[in-house]
Image: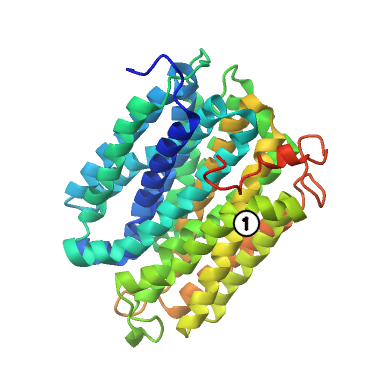
Amino acid sequence: MAKSLERINYRVVFAVLVVGACAYSMMQSLVTPVLPTIQEHFHTSQSTVTWVLTAYLLSASVFTPIFGRIGDMVGKEHMLVATLIVLALGTILAGLAGSIWVLVIARAIQGAGGALLPLSFGIVRDEFPDVKVATGVGIIAAMTAVGGGAGIVLAGPIVDTFGYHWLFWIPLILIVISIVSAFFFVPESPVRTPGKIAWLGALTLSAWLIALLIGVSEAPAWGWGSSKVLGLFALAALFLVVWIVVENRSSEPLIDMRMMRTRAVWSNNLVAFLLGIGMYAALAFIPEFLQTPRSNGYGFGASITESGLYLVPLTIMMFVFGMFTGKIAAKIGSKVAVIIGGAASTVGYFVIAFAHAQPWELITASTLLGIGLGLSYTGMSALIVHAVPPEQTGVASGMNANIRTIGGAFGAAVMSSIVTSTLLSNGRPVESGYTHGFAFLGAMTVLATLAAFVIPGGPGVFGNNGKHLENAELAMIPGGTIAEA
């Protein structure tokens, strides 16, 4: 790459990474409020259209560790550019899609863009001063809320003005800017790790995820006790065991199981998985609930734009509390921030489940979810960064984000299964489907909150060995301002 011999200022690199993260997260969320429109446009079922979201998350779950490993081998900046190009190609195909399954395939290609996060975390590790690494990682994680929120809010105006295909053409501009910026302004990786891709690990990871998600998605149609569904679950369990064995025996595993067994890592990953189940499913199904015509006995008959506005409090609170979790953690500790965040999210899901007749109830729930997810996700970023050696920051943070995505794929599939289990004569879900679905998300978040108590650390802000961090080290915790990074 044509880069200056002198290292480019890390603030410039940071700006490029933020733009890329926003582009990816916007692409992730833009279609969620528009799923009912896409369902109607392609004359398909609600369970089928959910694969527009699930395929994206499933692909991200598989390709994130693969692309991350390739980045270690050939250079993170090379792989960052390549990942953005793949995201652009998937976006072009989605814009041209003439059938629901072409759109699902396009979304699967876009999902490979999930590797942007661990690659960005690794580049931060390489380019930032040591005392700014955790801040950089945390802010990039928080900025994904900005892109995700922007996607939810902008989806309605874009569809109303131009049509749903422009949900892909407009973000493509931002992706192209990210490609050019990354090519010219992200320095070549100073550290390369020779090796090879553990393709057997990648194959078995893909196998158990696909078997599990197909089984969950098709269970309402085939029957939870049907031989096909039970066979898929058994196959998923088998491939999961094989995958773990393969990774443990591999000299160059796709996912380092030894690191995953560290208490500080596995406990944070468990919380990330359980919180991910709720977040992605909520972003997909809250708009669908809001857009349901009142003639069905529930819903608000909201337009795409109006349903997006209901989620503005979630976006704002997630960003604000994500940015300032570090300051909160300085008072109460990152672990306590995660616990409080989980509790707030739990209340938000149960409000949607059992009190969803008035607009203010949905707005209250949206606000609680934003506060909870903002505290939890950024708090986990701080805990992960301080739980592993510096050279494993990118891997550990990327894996935490990836496990959250796996939880999201699972949660979206289960939520779809619950919501669509009983349908009205017009093909829309009965109200109890949404009640049970959001109650399920609340239950998963209760488990996430309880799991957070297992995370090592006391009431203060602690480092790897339980030592209270000094003021200089507190600057590393996500929650500073962009200027500080």
- The image quarter containing residue 324 is bottom right
| Residue at the (72%, 37%) spot, across then down | 472
- Its colouring scheme is rainbow
Where is residue 46 shown, x and y percent of the image?
Answer: 34, 64
| Residue at the (24%, 50%) spot, across then down | 170
In-image side of 485 versus 76 (left or right): right
> Which amino acid is tagged 1?
Leu
Query: Which residue is labeled 1 in the image?
Result: 375
- Disc 1 residue crowd, few under 14, some 14–19, many 20+, Cα 10 Å: many
Residue in the foreground of this view, choosing between 204 and 293: 293
In-image side of 79 versus 376 (left or right): left
Where is residue 429 shown, x and y percent of the image?
Answer: 39, 74
**The N terminus lies in quadrant:** top left
| Residue at the (39%, 80%) spot, across then down | 299
Tally of numbered discs: 1
**The C terminus lies in quadrant:** top right
Residue in the foreground of this view, choosing between 423 and 294: 294
- The image quarter containing residue 441 is bottom right
Where is residue 136 shown, x and y percent of the image?
Answer: 55, 39
Where is residue 205 shown, x and y percent of the image?
Answer: 50, 35
**213, above or below 156, in the image:** above
Residue in the foreground of this view, choosing between 476 and 110: 476
